[in-house]
Image (tube, rainbow, N blue to C red):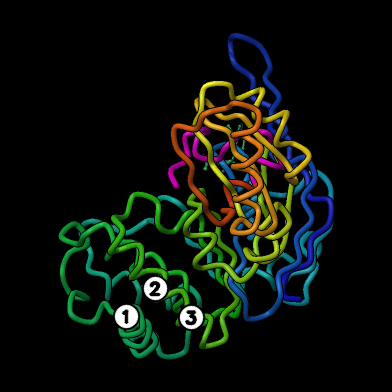
Amino acid sequence: MIISAQGLKKTFVTKSRKGTQTVEAVKSVDLDVKSGEIYGVLGPNGAGKTTTIRMLATLIAPDAGTARIAGYDLVKEPGQIRRRLGYVSQAGGVEEQNSPRAQVVFAAKIYGVPEPARAADDILKKMDLSEIADRPGRTLSGGQKRRVAIALGLVHTPPLLFLDEPTTGLDPQNRANLWDRIRELREQGTSVLLTTHYLEEADALCDRLAIVDHGVVVAEGTPAELKRSVSGDVVTLRLDELERAATVLGPMAKQTRVDDDMLRVYVDDGEHALPPLLRTLEAEGLPLRSIALERATLDDVFLAKTGRSLRDTGAAA
Ligand SMILES: Nc1ncnc2c1ncn2[C@@H]1O[C@H](COP(=O)(O)OP(=O)(O)OP(=O)(O)O)[C@@H](O)[C@H]1O
């Protein structure tokens, strides 16, 4: 394991004129990240993702809990850990005036990299930035800036990279491009811990993930395991008497859920479950407006664990 954390906890106390406010940002988080994998922390805004990744990156101290990262103790050996990780914050930190090359060379010097110019050249090439490496930062697109931010975090070739919401605000094409770069890093042996509130990103990119909500891990595993844990398929039905339909179909399903104007019926094998479902509805005199059969998504996992949809929490899919 490159990261093994148990019981991480962080409470923020803020004092203002209105009084003291206490936020339990992270209540208790356990995480195990294997060497060479892309591990995701998926959750809605305010779930505690940034706080978790900042504790693991030694940027803020946990109130409780223990962790070993790259073989070192989080509390006792933060300096050793810092040397072995790259951290790219949500904001990114790319300067407007200087070129990506100047910034990456500067970062290499700060890290004490032996040949800063060559190291910068290598990482700029890897992140597909060579052509634009000498332009001022302000002329770069959003996607290029994110790649420069990652180059800044990687110039000292750490075995572990932390990315806090790496693709937030990027269009689908730039997002897919960044996923490819992150996959290449994994191929070259870098372990990646990233946070995201994009369901699709967690599903497509991460080898394993933890779903967090209100500062706790509510589910953990590979995307496929997580989806299987809810059920294989979801039958979505639109009809008038949703509650009655839920009651009559309940015994035939792993779970049923009424969401706005539809009923979601979770079943193991949708294709075989459909005919008896339809027969039952007909026998009960429940006419359908529409029906759809879909594979379970990570949102279904979030829904099953928290009672809410991640899409409804303000996080885009
Ligand atoms: N320095 C701080 N002082 C006070 N409260 C904080 C501080 N940092 C975070 N919080 C609070 O802790 C909670 C968790 O925040 P955190 O940034 O870890 O969530 P997140 O899952 O990363 O959310 P987002 O996706 O919006 O970045 C939030 O309620 C936030 O307001």
**Image marks 1 and 2: residues in contact by CB distance under 8 Å:** yes
Q: CA distance from mark 1 to mark 2?
A: 6 Å
* Residue that label 2 marks: 151
Q: Magenta segment range?
A: 302-317
Q: Label 2 amino acid?
A: Ala
Q: CA distance from mark 3 to mark 2?
A: 11 Å
Q: For this rendering, which residue is in front, 36 or 294?
A: 294
At 33% from the left edge and 86% from the top edge, which residue is drawn? 117
Q: Secondary structure at mark 1?
A: helix
* Front position among marks 1 and 3: 3
- Residue 314 magenta-highlighted: yes
Judged from this view, the residue extending furthest toward the front is 283
Q: Earlier in the sequence, mark 3 or mark 2?
A: 2
At 63% from the left edge and 68% from the top edge, which residue is drawn? 82
* Residue that label 1 marks: 124
- Residue 299 magenta-highlighted: no
**Image marks 3 and 2: residues in contact by CB distance under 8 Å:** no
Q: Secondary structure at mark 2?
A: helix
Residue 45, compared with residue 89, is above or below; it is: above
Q: CA distance from mark 1 to mark 3?
A: 13 Å
